[in-house]
Image (cartoon, helix red, strand yellow):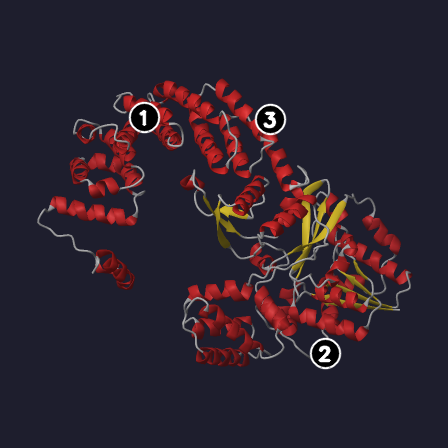
Amino acid sequence: MTVHLLGIRHHGPGSARAVAAALNELRPDIVLIEGPPEADKVVGLAASEEMEPPVALLAYAMDDSTRAAFWPFAVFSPEWQAIKYALAADVPVRFCDLPAAHQFASSGREGRRGVSMDPLATLANAGGYDDPERWWDDVIESRRDGAEPFTVIADAMRELRHDEEASGREAQREAYMRTVLRKAIREGFERIAVVCGAWHVPALEAPLPTAAHDARILKGLPKRKVACTWVPWTHGRLAAASGYGAGITSPGWYHHLFTAPDQITTRWLTKVAQVLRAEDLPVSSAHVIEAVRLADTLAALRERPLAGLSEVTEATRAVLCNGNDVLLNLVTREAVVGELLGSVPGETPQAPVAADLAAQARSLRLRRDATERVIELDLRKANDLLKSRLLHRLRILGVHWGVPAADERRAQGTFREMWKLIWDPGLEVELVAAGAHGTTVVGAATTVMLKVAADSSTLAQITAALEKSLLADLSDALPDLLQGVDTRAAADADVGHLMEALPALARSSRYGDVRGTDTAGLGTVASRMVSRICAGLGRTVHGLDPEAANAVQQLIDGVQDATALLAEEVRAEWLRTLEGLSDRPSVPPLIRGRLTRLMLDTSRLPDHEIALRLGRALSPGTPTVDAAGFVEGFLAGGGLLLVHDERLLGLVDAWLGAIPDDAFVEVLPLLRRTFGTFAAPERRTIGARAKVLADPGSVVVANDDDLDAELAASVLPVVAQLLGV
């Protein structure tokens, strides 16, 4: 009986190549792999032709889906190569790490490992390297031939662990690994291969501690019922930047190292050139040739066996990107990291909600992509409407596969939706968690909304839930939510609460029209709410301090937008109320300015009355702070008024010029807050027009630096055609 310990680093192409070669040479009759033993039941699925890495094992506690973990594998992962070998050779393959059942049941106080140094850093320093990653890359990952590395790795780790004794969770893991190894020996296997992290090799070497010793370490460990399955994974999720503990910096580069048959540098830089050409950048074959020469020369100068990532990156920056780091970042994102999404077989066991989502996605032809894409839905089309409902239901469940591509409020009452779709493998855990609410997407989402209807303490919360339910077409939740809205609206005497809740209610009424949802009575509830708001608005806006006035102004803007979606008589009642308050002295200047602007926008007051009010607010007798508040409220939301109304611009300009120096310092923050909301072109135009006011003989000349001649020339043919030239 012989035990072969193959110490590896997770996700390393050199390690993967070495493991594959060693297993083909050793021909073991069982393969043990570091990983959760719960996966033994599903490991056979890796033999399916539909299984395409990167993939991951997902284990989760069945009574608490927040306790979950992934074990990812890429094609260049040594463990994946070991799994593929065992399944192809028809020999048993088992996982030998501490079961997830114990890991998920623990309190987390055990500690990860009792290690006093970074093993890679120590070995790299001994080899004369100041970068542990570059040392490992030179010694292991970039190797394509030569002697197997496992004996040397074992010697190195044995020396590093000479005075180290595992403790806490690390001791439990290694005790369990030895337990699985002893079981394989007792079962009579003659040639046992163990693929594990290099650090664990000394702990698994003969002579092993007694079984009683390991039993004491594992005695009394709590346990939890755990489920395990396969899920698709991405290269981006393998990257260290994603927060993955065993992550690597360059999954795309490692994939290339493992899969390229020869001419590693040439093939890689050709791929980089393709990435840049896809962005319409001029990269020729001569660029690639020079980049290859530079990378190989750098590797020779640095005495490296092969041009590594640092060499090809420097060659890319210097030759293909002309020193442009923005382009280099593009290459890093598209090639060095890459965004490859794996796939799992259709027969893979899934949580009920996940299985329902997969079936619906196939039916609606919604494919899961690891790269972001934007789709446009026309709600008048049955298939697009179903897609919209599915995406909204998933958002209720916290599964944000799709995110609205623009502010939803800008498209109320239309038949068009834009969504940004990107599939993150981490969403698999959210799908498992959704199973606590039901077995289907619609059932789980309905349960969540019914819970909101029962538990919501505020009117705004329940109207927001009603809006979500209408978007998601959760018909079983609507009666309870509608009843909740009516009940809470009748009982809530706080005008601020009513104003906060009305926009969602108004949008819900409009959505009912657009989507064909029956929301009878919703408009009546909204109408009653507007009447109560109008009755109490005068008290609400009386004598507010600046901070409270700003909050109420935002609520007024929300109601203003909401009433545009309701019946004309409701809108008229609201505007009459605003008109009556717009010139009341007890109303804070900020709100009076805003109400006056709304009267202008809705043509409720003639222009000369607006000019009179503005002139009065900006007169020398008005305190400067009050005048600044009025201007802020009046101009909030854009500076086009000042661009197009020279009389208004003159009033504001004269007022600004008359502010005393000491008062100007006081009102400057208010002015900056007001003018800072204007778009840059608006600010430039306002400044130019103000210059003409100060010097009527001056001429405004466009700044050539701001003119994009190429862009301007591109529209001239269209303008000429419109003018009939």
Residue displayed at 78% across by 44% down: 223
Q: Nearer the viewer, mark 3 or mark 1?
A: 1
The three-letter code of the residue at mark 2 reads: Ala
Give SS at disc 3.
Answer: helix
Residue displayed at 41% across by 19% down: 532
Residue denoted by label 2: 147
Q: Give the image location of residue 150, x and y in percent.
A: 74, 71
Q: Nearer the viewer, mark 2 or mark 1?
A: 1
Is label 3 in contact with label 1 (beta carbons under 8 Å)? Answer: no
The answer to whether residue 256 is left or right of residue 15 is left
C-alpha separation, residue under disc 3 versus residue under disc 2: 68 Å
Q: Name the disc covering residue 454, or none.
A: 3
Q: Give the image location of residue 459, x and y in percent.
A: 50, 26
Front residue of 5/550: it is: 550
Q: Earlier in the sequence, mark 3 or mark 1?
A: 3
C-alpha separation, residue under disc 3 versus residue under disc 1: 35 Å
Front residue of 601/693: it is: 601
The three-letter code of the residue at mark 1 reads: Leu
The three-letter code of the residue at mark 3 reads: Ala
**Vertical placement of 123 versus 640: above or below?**
below
Is label 2 in contact with label 1 (beta carbons under 8 Å)? Answer: no
Residue displayed at 88% across by 65% down: 189
Is label 3 in contact with label 2 (beta carbons under 8 Å)? Answer: no
Which image quarter is the C terminus in?
A: bottom left
Q: Give the image location of residue 585, x and y in percent.
A: 26, 21
Residue denoted by label 1: 575
